[in-house]
Amino acid sequence: GSELRATLYISDEQGRDYVSTVDVISILAYAQLCFDSYSYEAQPALYTLLVDTMNYGAAAQLYFGRRTDCLVNSGLEAYQQYATAQLSEELNDSMVTLQGQGTAVSKLGFTVNFADKTELNAKLTLSDSSAEITSVQVTDADGNLLATLTEFTTLSDGRLQVTYHDIKATQLRQMYYFTAYAGDQAVSATAGYSVEAYAKGCIEGSNASLAELVRRCMYYGDSAVNYFVQKGVESK
């Protein structure tokens, strides 16, 4: 619901400057524009994605205590009939540990951030406190390297934490595999985790507002997959 304000500044070859009028937009305004421009019958997947996005945003406002008196999905009651009401498939809470043996890192644990964007934290328990962990590599299910993380935070319990930032809305059920390195030597087992796994644990937990947040997040992710897969098929 927050508005973004953009102004375009241009200088021509003669050095003359031009400034555009201020353009104001928000995700909520974009959603309303789509609702006004298309019918549900013409764009059912888009309708669901937009309503799920607004519902996820409202759940985040409530969980993080931001402008809770002005929820982003307020006034969209007529569109709630198009929202996702059931997960596309049951949530899987498995954490996968693959080949390898920890020599300096005995355990990898995981949490998820939802505040500014969806991020996956890997927390390293050191078995050798003198070891110098230089990076954590993140790969996908096919072994493709997605990122090499080198920025570590030392937590209060002594564990090291790295954060993987590049999770798209369509990838909430995707497994990400983490391996710690000292130089070019792997010093941990490879462990895989997903936002989906974290979400299932939260939904089954006692924090109602967090459970609602992750449920709405997974609805949003499922509808994003449905919308963009459909677009891919249509574009072909």
Image (cartoon, helix red, strand yellow):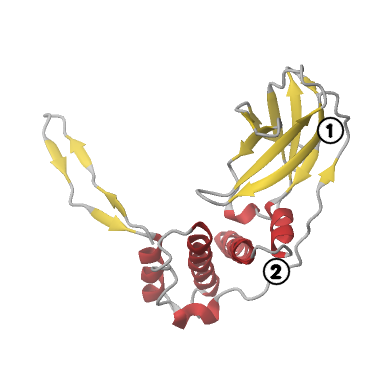
Q: Nearer the viewer, residue 127 or 59?
A: 127
Q: Measured from the top left, where is residue 146 in percent x and y? A: 66, 36
Quadrant in the rendering for residue 107: top right
Q: Which residue is tagged 1?
A: 189
> Is residue 153 left or right of 4 when viewed as pictured?
right
- Tell me if I can see residue 175 in this picture: yes
> Is residue 198 left or right of 48 when viewed as pictured?
right
Above or below residue 151? Residue 168 is below
Q: Measured from the top left, where is residue 181 in percent x and y? A: 75, 24
Residue 130 is tagged as none
- Tell me if I can see residue 141 in this picture: no
> Is residue 50 left or right of 10 when viewed as pictured?
right
Which quadrant of the rendered structure holds the C terminus? bottom right
Q: Which residue is tagged 2?
A: 88
10 Å crowding of disc 2: few (<14), some (14-19), many (20+): some
Above or below residue 20? Residue 25 is below
Q: Give the CA distance from mark 1 to mark 2.
A: 31 Å
Label 1 SS: loop
Q: Measured from the top left, where is residue 94 in percent x and y? A: 81, 53
Amino acid type assigned to the residue bearing label 1 in the image = Ala
Above or below residue 32? Residue 110 is above
Quadrant in the rendering for residue 156: top right
Q: Measured from the top left, where is residue 22 in percent x and y? A: 21, 52
Label 2 SS: loop
10 Å crowding of disc 1: few (<14), some (14-19), many (20+): many
Q: Residue placed at 58% from the left, 63% from the top?
A: 220
Q: Residue placed at 54% from the left, 72% from the top?
A: 48
Q: Nearer the viewer, residue 229 or 121?
A: 121
Q: Residue placed at 70% from the left, 38% from the top?
A: 122
Amino acid type assigned to the residue bearing label 2 in the image = Ser
Quadrant in the rendering for residue 166: top right
